[in-house]
Image: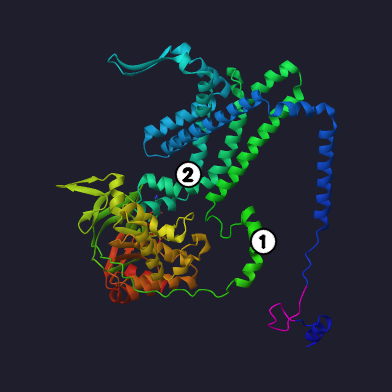
Amino acid sequence: MTIVSDFSGSIPPAKTAQGSGDFPHFRIVPARYPGRTIGSIFAILVIAATLHSILGNPRWGWDVFAEWFFAEPVLVGLGRTLLLTALGAFFGFALGTGLALARVSRSPLLVAVSWAFVWLFRSIPLVVLLLLINNLGYLYETITVSVPYTGINFISWNTTQLITPFAAGVIGLTLNQAAFASEIFRGGILSVDQGQMEAAAALGLPRGHQARRIILPQAMRSILPTAFNDIIGLAKGTSQVYILALPELFYTIQIIYRRNLEVVPLLMVATVWYLVILTVLSIIQHHIERHYARGALRNPPPSIFARFYRRGRNKVEAISATPARLPEAKAVVSPLPTRGGTVSMHGVSKSFGPLKVLDNVTLTVPAGSVTAILGQSGSGKSTLLRSINHLERLDEGFIAIDGEFVGYRQSGDTLSELKEREILKRRVEVGMVFQNFNLFPHLTVLENIVEAPLTVRGTPRAQAEADARELLARVGLSEKANAYPRQLSGGQQQRVAIARALALKPKVLLFDEPTSALDPELVNEVLDVIKELARSGTTLIIVTHEIGFAREVSDLVVFMDQGRILETGRPDKVLNVPDHPRTAEFLTKVL
Ligand SMILES: Nc1ncnc2c1ncn2[C@@H]1O[C@H](COP(=O)(O)OP(=O)(O)OP(=O)(O)O)[C@@H](O)[C@H]1O
């Protein structure tokens, strides 16, 4: 009571702008930061002293600077510097990307070639490399295109005429740049979570598409700052081609000041032009980094332009914005057709080094059924699941879906392993939902879902998007189509992951502990979606620790221990009166 009377006594109530109530009207005074003010004054003094020293000292020779800044020879030299930078960066990064992909490939020969290239060209100083290329004519008088050992020559050039100083400059800068760029790209590729590659592979996306759409865009976030550092180094490094007597910016400046002896003003001409180049590159870098930061931050800061734009619009928005939140869409039964496949596993074994993780597993999962795989941590459940879509290679035995082997082609009694491209095609029949969702963070929810249907099934975009929206409605997330995964809760991300897997209309859907990365209150929203799916006709195989859920939803429960299936049967049998003492022991621990 005292507080209320004090409050109303000191600040009289006033009408709000809308006149909707008797709330006090406050004037907001921003906090004061005296330290910040002192810092700003100090900065102004330093800038003023620097400008006074630079502009007031006649020895800087600003009149000579003005005379030469736009002089024709300087601009020609500048043009050459820019051209060398652009060509060196373009060819260097193109070659560097190829070398990086070769280095992370599975071919030992490509890895070795890439490693040797980087080792060699990072070791040779640029000046030495430029001189070597410029003197190539001494080693090889002509360069000939021919069929080796046949004497058939198509065309031949004189090496010295072909490799002009400019060409030598471009080749030298390219080779040097490629060696460094390759390592920058490799670092970026390695920084992408392995789950992203597995999710892309599980969706059946072709290798090139995985690299272009999934891996490189995410790698770009760590590649860009270092790559631009490198390009800036290259822009300045072009000055080293003076060794070939090639008049780029710095060499031109040297020629001029040797004649007129105005060393400092002309060095300032070069310095200011380099500053201009670097400023332009920094602006480009800023914009490219913003582009590749899509989805990386939950609340990305607005760009400078957007900030100004928003300031002007804020008042309008404050009046027109509707505060109402759209309600979550209710799960609806989708008309998307799905048909389950029969999964047959026979004598499946798999070891990691000396550890036998799967030991002679034989199991048949009927089409359209729901199977729950239970077992202690480390019993091989995930490995079995990953073997079904060939993310793990078997040592022995086989797994078939509707009689077709996922990773192999049968001819008589021989199973030949398929090429990766063919395996990716067959994976389309098997969707997978991972424990950690593995959504692509740089793509919106809608883009995540349409990526595989567009690429793998060749579905037209309009159709793919309509299907995706229908699936989003099915998992209750219609209004999140344009959000990025990081802007969603864990449960919502997992529901999107389910929609993404369903978008390919798989015969079999694998769930690898779909709720174990979720907070307890989010578990049910995901389980509800899976329960709804259980009646859709798709074959579901679920590794789970949710015994109640397994009891409610599954047709078949499989209990695994040390890589073996100890028991299978209907849930009421296995979960209530298990045959095997290990199953009973496990159930008493988890229930
Ligand atoms: N790539 C690998 N290299 C070496 N060992 C592995 C590899 N993958 C799995 N393992 C081992 O295989 C065994 C089975 O692993 P798996 O992930 O299949 O078990 P799980 O039953 O799914 O366990 P959890 O319930 O804890 O996920 C474990 O001992 C694990 O350490």
Q: Which mark is residue 186?
A: none
Task: Identify the amino acid type marked 1.
Answer: Arg
- The answer to if 17 sits in the magenta stretch is yes
Q: Which mark is residue 189?
A: 2
Position in image of residue 470 (x %, y %): 37, 67
Depth check, front residue: 257 or 514? 257
Q: Is residue 470 left or right of residue 65?
A: left
Quick check: can you spot residue 174? yes
Q: Earlier in the sequence, mark 1 or mark 2?
A: 2
Q: Label 1's element?
A: helix
Query: Vertically, is 475 above or below 20?
Result: above
Depth check, front residue: 172 or 54? 54
Residue at the image position 43 percent from the left and 49 percent from the top: 213
- Mark 1 near ligand 1 (CB under 8 Å)? no
Picture quadrant of ligand 1: bottom left
Q: Which mark is residue 311?
A: 1
The N terminus sits in image quarter: bottom right
Q: CA distance from mark 1 to mark 2?
A: 39 Å
- Classified by dominant secondary structure, the portion drawn in magenta counts as loop
Position in image of residue 499 (x %, y %): 38, 64
Q: Residue furthest bottom?
A: 1
The crowding category of the residue bearing disc 2, from other C-alpha atoms within 10 Å (few below 14, some 14 to 19, many at least 20), is many
Quick check: can you spot residue 589? no
Task: Identify the amino acid type marked 2.
Answer: Ile
Depth check, front residue: 81 or 582? 81
Marks 1 and 2: CB-CB under 8 Å?
no
Residue at the image position 47 percent from the left and 71 percent from the top: 522
Q: Look at discs 1 and 2 and give the one toward the viewer.
A: 1
Q: Label 2's element?
A: helix
Residue at the image position 74 percent from the left and 26 percent from the top: 67
Position in image of residue 364 (x %, y %): 23, 63
